[in-house]
Amino acid sequence: MTRLLRTYLQPYARWLLAVIVLQLLGTIASLYLPTLNANVIDYGIVKGDTAYILRTGGWMLLMTLGQIACSVVGAYYAARMAMSFGRDLRSAVFRRVLGFSERELARFGAPSLITRNTNDVQQVQMLVAVSGSTMIGAPIMGIGAIIMAVREDPGLSWLLGICVPVLAIVVGAVAWRMVPLFRRMQTFVDGVNRILREQIAGIRVVRAFVREPEETRRFAAANADLTDTALRAGRLLALLLPSIVLILNASSAAVLWVGAVRISAGQTQIGDVTAFLVYLAQILLAVMMATFMLMMLPRAAVSAERIGDVLGTESSVAPPRNPVKAAAAHAQVELRAVTFTYPGAADPVLRAISLGVAAGQTLAVIGSTGAGKTTLLSLIPRLLDPTAGAVLVDGVDVRRLDSDWLCSRIGLVPQRPYLFSGTVASNLRFGDPDAADEDLWKALEVAQAREFVEELSGGLAAPIAQGGTNISGGQRQRLAIARALLRKPRIYLFDDSFSALDLGTEARLRAALRPVTRESAVLIVTQRVSSIRNADQIAVLEGGGIVGLGRHRELLDTCPTYAEIVASQLTAEEAA
């Protein structure tokens, strides 16, 4: 946490310095007030000197006003510093997550990343906000009050040597027990977040299989774990405040008793005992303030550790140190002996894959579920990097290419087409932010989506829910295809992008795509034979390796795996 605070508070060092100075001045004023009050009692009230009372009272009023001004201004700068710190930290986590490959995203998981960028950042931000007014003032007040108390009456100082250590031991014991509880709480928050996210996203499946009672029990179990841990931490906190109040009252009673004995013996004055009592309260108040910080510190420390894990994780897809831009006029994609293994997996997903496709050609990849088709496609835009071999675009290894240049050449339609909350137009303009409405309609027409968009209320301005949940799967696929078309890429990557379309719509779509993609390299991943029968080359994957490569008719005769796939989908007449 120290490194996190040092890094992201550095731009606000001036505000931090202002907070420290203001807290110092306010605390000095607060510490001087009991001494003035003691003088009013000993030299004003006891001696009946009204002028001294008024004069010293005026100084006390000025001290109080100064203390209030310092506290208000210090709190303002502390709040600005904390809010700015939180903004910068959230932005840093967001930018880091945007750079993660699929490997890092799978490692952390979406629910955990969301919690880290919201709840965890908030915990650290609250610590910074409270520190500006509490952590800085508490040690100044505690040390200053001890010095002033000893100065007022050294004979009573031995009481400080008893009450302060006892209070510190109580606070330390509670804080020591709370750290592991807060660490577990953040883990349980992740669990509740994950289950809730799954149930909301899969509500149709839950209802279709009548799993509401089971899902309710699963959420209740995760919620109970979080609640039990929070209650255990709450019980510890509930013990803390009464313990502090007990020590404070016992210490005050001891001061009054010992002070009364010393006053009777003429060893001290009433004002000194009164001031000592106030300083004792300030000392214990400082310890209470530190206690409040210690209540927040364990949870903030755990949150900072979790944030640091994200910020300290480098993407496995590292940007090139000296990025280059290929200069070829036409796109060409080549995979040379590519092997890919997921972390922790015993066997590679892809084994020595060598394929190529040039501009104006279509390469199709087909195979059973789990054959590695999507993984192969993810290597081209560098969503993943191969563990062996190389992926080349225009003859240059993608690991050397400028990332923005590479992405500008690629139009990707993922297996699960994701749409963002907004409108039809805003989603399409992800492909080209400057596209005119006329261009949007042309892309929709090619993607066979114009008709249903025109029927939507508002047309291009029709609202789209997060994930596109307010339209059908086939409509989402067609909008995703239109989004890729607006980019006018040199390389098209279709990852099972026609699976939700009926055969008639798919046939019209493929016919409309041919003139648009005539000068581009097209890679299609699919399980549907009808989508790839006319491809220039078909690669058949099985067990991570290529077991067949050629055109449709060739593979029917030479590749048993392909023939089996065809036989399961088409009649003999259709296959021929």
Image: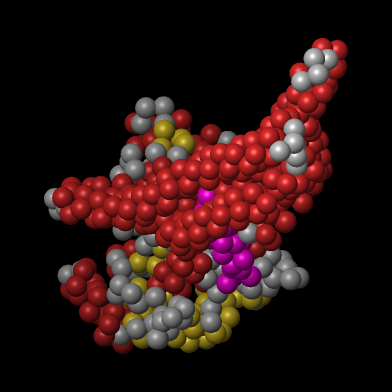
Number of callouts: 0
Q: Is residue 398 left or right of residue 464?
A: right
Q: Position of residue 274 (x, y in %)?
A: 69, 32
Does the magenta portion include 313? yes
1 vs 368: above or below: above
Q: Quadrant of the N terminus?
A: bottom right
Q: Is residue 379 left or right of residue 230?
A: right
Q: Residue at x 59, y 67 (%)?
A: 313
Is 259 or 502 nearer to us in this picture? 259
Q: Quadrant of residue 547?
A: bottom left
Q: Main secondary structure of the magenta part?
A: helix
Q: Position of residue 243 (x, y in %)?
A: 48, 47
444 vs 113: above or below: above
Q: Residue at x 29, y 75 (%)?
A: 368
Does the magenta portion include 521? no
Is 95 or 310 nearer to us in this picture? 310
The magenta segment is: 295-318
The residue furthest left is: 210
Question: Does residue 346 appear in this view?
Answer: yes
Q: Position of residue 23 (x, y in %)?
A: 76, 38
Question: Does residue 189 appear in this view?
Answer: no
Q: Residue at x 32, y 53 (%)?
A: 228
Q: Quadrant of residue 497?
A: bottom left
Is 222 or 276 nearer to us in this picture? 276
547 vs 198: above or below: below
Q: Residue at x 39, y 60 (%)?
A: 415
Is 321 or 243 nearer to us in this picture? 243
The residue furthest top is: 50
Q: Quadrant of the C terminus?
A: bottom left
